[in-house]
Image (spheres, coloured by chain):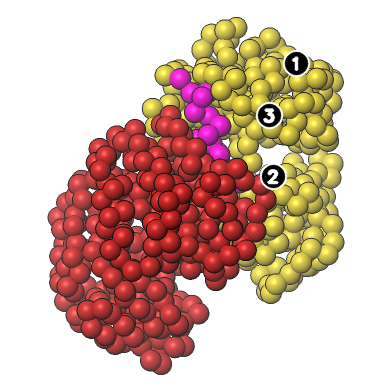
Chain colours: A yellow, B red
């Protein structure tokens, strides 16, 4: 993967795709954005990134259909996982003999979905530790962080993993290569499950003591940002208990997650400003929630591994009630 | 798997689970039904099978939770695939060291879901060529056929495949062991995609020439049974074109489906009475459609294999519009 000649497609140009695609574009790569709703705006005006590290503006090649882009060296998938049934259609024209596929999507199962569709291609997963919001079409607000933890699906990191990591690092984004992609996913779920999940639960007007004793419920209040969850005793308790369930699940599945990981993440989150995770924003916009990737698949695997996860099970039920 | 000692759980006791579970029960196996809505009725009255081969009545052990059943030799999964996110919870207490898992669910991806959750267990898939309806709780109407085509997930048939085939055959049900489970799935999809899919499309009040030119649509008419689809020129044409797309897709994925398979299936279906497939019944009852397993995963794989499937793509869009 020679950086200067690398042809890159970004599939799913919400906040994550636009930010990382924008960084690659800024450093002179041949970057093609596959767009639907934002096509006109991005074609006219490019993409504006308002970043804590300095604002910038880029003009990726805007395409409305994957056929206009054609085969790429690297396809970066940042679609909502709720649209994974469209991957075959959206990616096929982008995939040639040597195309590498990198998913930056939330949660579990996304690499497997790509590998199932494109069994001959190398598949990578990247976890994005970043706070981003797409504030309007073509405008991304980069609030904090940005590191990617990268791994190869179904194997150990290899030369191609290193080349992709180096390509992303060349834009200034820190990249850690993980020897165990699934473990890295579970480490990130320790954060996502409580903060993405309970934030939406708060919108049901439930207090923390009621989660787990659920009947039909409807949104009656605002979502709870990270600070609201950590500043309130019962909610913080529930964050902690959920984190412990996720850590126990990851460990039972053979990934040696650190027992102190939950506390570390809570402390790191306390020093962040109030943050509304992607699931909260999806919910407030009336979009489908990433139930399978972020909640149901982790729950299913935890249960299959024989771990008791009553809090996670109750959270899944609640989110299913609230999902559109 | 010694037949007389074999402990069997049936998970998902709709028409398919109750019929095959009932046959195993009738021949004296130790069969446990895991039930939700029908629990009281089945515990009180057992299961009544009204079959073209002679009615019969059985009393499986009725359980409300998998923990009451405990580890089994064989777990037969006949849940709607739309409930696959519950597999971890429902199956874990049933799975011991030597438990085999057999899914009789529709479409693609179900064996993979089981293998993902229970990587140490042998996983099998069975395609049921049968016409069944659950007419009320605990009452199953067996209208026609019954054969199962059985295969091992991720490998060739082995001794355990043969033992499970023999166990089912001992109830009088014909079983073919397939050397290639994925090919067998594609052969069955050649039937399911047009008849399950277009039958529901008919309920949108569309005529066949309009499928593929879709805006938002709502159900305004009855579903179309098999005979209505085959007795009407434009619908029959669409059945044929869809079958050809599915055959081309299966072939492109490396399964040598016979080019005459579509015509063979249409002829075989013409001599059946009018039949409402499970998807039509789900739709008429307001239940979620098995979009992913029967339509979206096949479409995704066809597209990833580079096959043009405009009819299947239009059908997926239409069914997504109509889904609850």
Q: Are marks 1 and 2 on the same chain?
A: yes
| Above or below: residue B45 compared with residue A112 | below
Q: Which mark identifies residue A59?
A: 1
**Which part of the image, by quadrant, shows the C terminus of chain A?**
bottom right
Q: Can residue A85 be found in the magenta stretch?
A: yes
Q: Chain of mark 3?
A: A
Locate residue A250 relative to residue B105 in the image: left or right. right
How far apart marks 2 and 3 lie (CA) works out to: 34 Å
Q: Horizontal and vertical percent for residue A241?
A: 65, 60
* Residue at the far bottom in the pictured view: B44
Q: Which mark identifies residue A35?
A: 3
**Pointers 2 and 3 in contact (C-beta within 8 Å):** no
Which portion, as a residue range, is magenta?
A82-96
Q: Earlier in the sequence, mark 1 or mark 2?
A: 1
How far apart marks 1 and 2 lie (CA) works out to: 36 Å
To which residue does mark 2 refer?
Answer: A265
Residue at point 42%, 19% (across, down): A97
Residues A28 and B107: in front is: B107
> Dot 2 surroundings within 10 Å: few (below 14), some, or many (20 or more)?
some
Q: Chain of mark 1?
A: A
Q: Is residue B30 visible?
A: no
| Above or below: residue A173 compared with residue B42 | above
Residues B241 and B91: in front is: B241
Q: Horizontal and vertical percent for residue B63?
A: 41, 81
């Amino acid at each position: 993967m020679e950086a200067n000649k690398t042809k890159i497609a970004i599939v799913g140009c919400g906040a994550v795709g636009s930010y990382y695609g924008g960084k690659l574009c800024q450093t002179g790569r041949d970057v093609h954005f596959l767009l639907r709703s934002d096509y006109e705006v991005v074609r006219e005006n490019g993409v504006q990134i308002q970043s804590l590290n300095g604002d910038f503006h880029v003009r990726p090649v805007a395409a409305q259909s994957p056929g206009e882009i054609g085969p790429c060296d690297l396809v970066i998938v940042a679609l909502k996982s709720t649209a994974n049934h469209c991957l075959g259609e959206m990616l096929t024209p982008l995939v040639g003999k040597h195309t590498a596929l990198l998913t930056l999507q939330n949660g579990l199962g996304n690499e497997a979905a790509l590998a199932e569709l494109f069994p001959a291609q190398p598949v990578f997963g990247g976890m994005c530790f970043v706070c981003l919001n797409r504030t309007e079409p073509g405008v991304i607000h980069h609030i904090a962080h940005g590191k990617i933890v990268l791994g190869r699906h179904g194997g150990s990191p290899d030369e191609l993993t290193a080349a992709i990591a180096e390509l992303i690092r060349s834009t200034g984004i820190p990249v850690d290569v993980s020897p165990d992609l699934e473990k890295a996913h579970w480490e990130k779920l320790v954060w996502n499950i409580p903060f993405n999940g309970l934030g939406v639960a708060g919108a049901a007007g439930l207090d923390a003591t009621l989660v787990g004793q659920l009947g039909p419920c409807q949104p009656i209040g605002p979502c709870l940002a990270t600070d609201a969850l950590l500043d309130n005793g019962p909610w913080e308790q529930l964050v902690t208990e959920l984190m412990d369930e996720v850590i126990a699940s990851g460990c039972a599945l053979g990934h040696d997650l650190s027992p102190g990981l939950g506390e570390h993440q809570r402390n790191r989150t306390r020093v962040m400003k109030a943050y509304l995770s992607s699931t909260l924003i999806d919910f407030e916009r009336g979009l489908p929630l990433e139930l399978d990737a972020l909640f149901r698949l982790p729950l299913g695997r935890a249960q299959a591994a024989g771990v008791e996860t009553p809090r996670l099970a109750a959270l899944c039920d609640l989110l299913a009630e609230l999902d559109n």
